Image: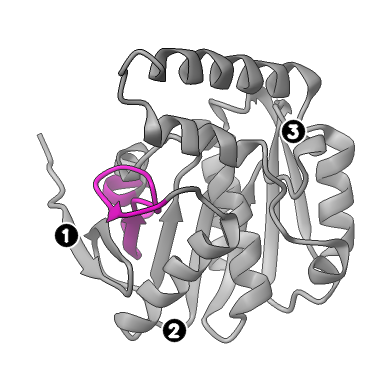
Amino acid sequence: MRELKTEWQQLKDIKMAFWQHGSGPDLVLLHGNSGSKAKFKDYLLDYFADYHTYALDSRGHGESRSKDAHLVYEKKSLDVINFCKARGMKDVSVIGYSDGAILGLWLAVKAPEIFTKIVAISPNTLVSGGTEASTLFIEKSLKTMRFLSRFGVPLKKPIMRFNLMLTDSGIDDEDLMKIQTSVMVLYAERDMIKEDHILHIAGLIPDCRLEKVPDCNHMTIPYTEEAIRLMQEYLIS
């Protein structure tokens, strides 16, 4: 079995856990809400083996360590920027999934001098961009976790994570229109994000490439052959 070793990068107020693998152009991988770098093991070892890949555990997730009362997308994106600066990384490509896709858009807004290509898989900038069913599921789950926490069940981090999904990204339409970094947006045929919201985001980003991936949903899109093929093709173009 091929194993990846966890390393840590100490930043101002977070000890960020990450995996790295390979050599070649730098590629940063950003997981979704309640996920971790482990979601990208096959990306590092197989799908993007020709890159120097970094899979990060974002603030409040995985093995990263920080003291937070709540989570904010913009602050989480600054962690990624500071990680890349600390390691002297430039001309960086990014694949971000779900919440990681939101961070990817923030990176394009904030640091185009570092990030040259962003793949945003199923991003949303507004809570209202999610389907009614997905928002209801998040709200019910959060209610259950808050109830259980009253009886001593340790759910601080899961509650913070689910609260984040009920928080707008902080990215507005004007931010999207000013993006200079090359961006590709992927979304699933059966996504948790409304199609009209995805189309709105992609329509505002200059020269954005937009691809709808068939026969998958929000949870499976990062692992479909078609999505992987599209990402590989885009990153070498």
On the rendered structure, is 177 left or right of 120? right
- Kindly state the secondary structure of the residue where label 2 is placed: loop
User: Taking the image as drawn, is residue 202 in sight?
Assistant: yes
**How dense is the environment of label 1, judged by Cα within 10 Å: few (below 14), some, or many (20 and up)?**
some
Estimate the x, y position of residue 30 in percent, counting from the top left: 45, 52
Give the mark nearer the N terminus: 1 vs 3. 1
- Kindly state the secondary structure of the residue where label 1 is placed: strand
Q: Quadrant of the N terminus?
A: top left
Specify start and end residues of the magenta stretch as a single range: 44-68
Residue at mark 1 to residue at mark 3: CA–CA distance: 33 Å
Q: Residue at x 30, y 25 (%)?
A: 154
**How dense is the environment of label 3, judged by Cα within 10 Å: few (below 14), some, or many (20 and up)?**
many
Residue at mark 2 to residue at mark 1: CA–CA distance: 20 Å
Q: Which residue is mark 1?
A: 7
Give above or below for 12 relative to 160: below
Estimate the x, y position of residue 52 in percent, counting from the top left: 31, 67
Give the mark nearer the N terminus: 2 vs 1. 1
Coloring scheme used: one colour
Q: Which residue is mark 2?
A: 90
Badge 1 amino acid? Glu
Viewer-nearest residue: 99 or 158: 158
Question: Is disc 2 in contact with disc 1, using a CB cutoff of under 8 Å?
Answer: no
User: Taking the image as drawn, is residue 234 in sight?
Assistant: no
Q: Quadrant of the C terminus?
A: bottom right
Q: Residue at x 62, y 28 (%)?
A: 218
Q: Which residue is mark 3?
A: 193
